[in-house]
């Protein structure tokens, strides 16, 4: 974004009312995707110039369909090496990248409004909603969901990188 002249602010930010309220409660709060979305919506709503718009970048079906370029590229690469996967493993936040990764291969629960999870390195993978297409695949038992701790994921990543 900065490459194209945009300004990037960390979240939580002292530039929004919500960010200020969060930081007042806990100055070391690392933020979540939900916090960033709240701040972005606040900025768009409060903009009196009409120049600020907000567009949700995950979860929505049109975003998932746009992301299918990921799976289409994967199919081309797998075809080049004559491989057909029997399992596909991916991390899932709101579901758009996962949907884009998996949907080309195929011929919501919440924790409450006042729940704030512990900080993790991949906050974007912890989102309070899920794309309807991915949810349908889960409900139909086309895909399965497995949860791993951050430590387990890091250990697996180190093992993968070293082998």
Image: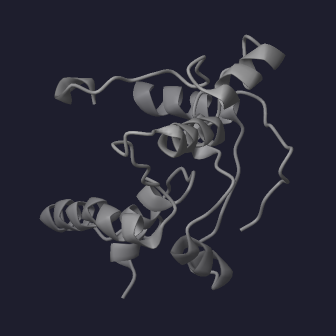
Q: Residue at x 39, y 64 (%)?
A: 63
Residue 108, horizontal then vertical, whole percent: 71, 68
- Residue 15, located in which quarter of the rendered image? top right
Q: Residue at x 17, y 65 (%)?
A: 76
148 is higher (above) or lower (below) than 137? above
- Of residue 152 and residue 7, the one placed in the foreground of this image is 7
Which residue lies most toward the left here? 80
Viewport quadrant of the N terminus: top left
Viewport quadrant of the C terminus: top left
Colour scheme employed for the rendering of this structure: one colour
Query: Residue 123: in sight, yes or no?
Result: yes
94 is higher (above) or lower (below) than 103? above
Q: Is residue 64 left or right of residue 141?
A: left
Which residue lies most toward the front here? 48
Which residue lies most toward the bottom here? 107
- Residue 9, located in which quarter of the rendered image? top left
89 is higher (above) or lower (below) than 17? below
């Amino acid at each position: 974004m900065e490459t194209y002249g945009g300004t990037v602010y960390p979240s939580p930010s002292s530039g929004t009312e919500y960010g200020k309220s969060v930081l007042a409660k806990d100055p070391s709060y690392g933020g979540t995707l939900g916090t960033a979305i709240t701040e972005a919506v606040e900025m768009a709503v409060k903009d009196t110039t009409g120049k600020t718009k907000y567009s949700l970048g995950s979860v929505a079906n049109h975003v998932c369909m746009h992301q299918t370029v990921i799976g289409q590229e994967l199919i081309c690469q797998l075809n080049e090496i004559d491989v057909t996967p029997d399992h596909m493993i991916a991390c899932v936040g709101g579901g758009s990248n996962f949907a884009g990764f998996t949907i080309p291969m195929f011929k919501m629960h919440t924790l409450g409004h006042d729940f704030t999870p512990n900080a993790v390195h991949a906050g974007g993978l912890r989102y309070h909603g899920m794309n309807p297409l991915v949810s349908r695949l889960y409900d139909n038992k086309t895909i399965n969901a497995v949860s791993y701790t951050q430590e387990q994921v890091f250990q697996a990543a180190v093992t993968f990188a070293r082998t």
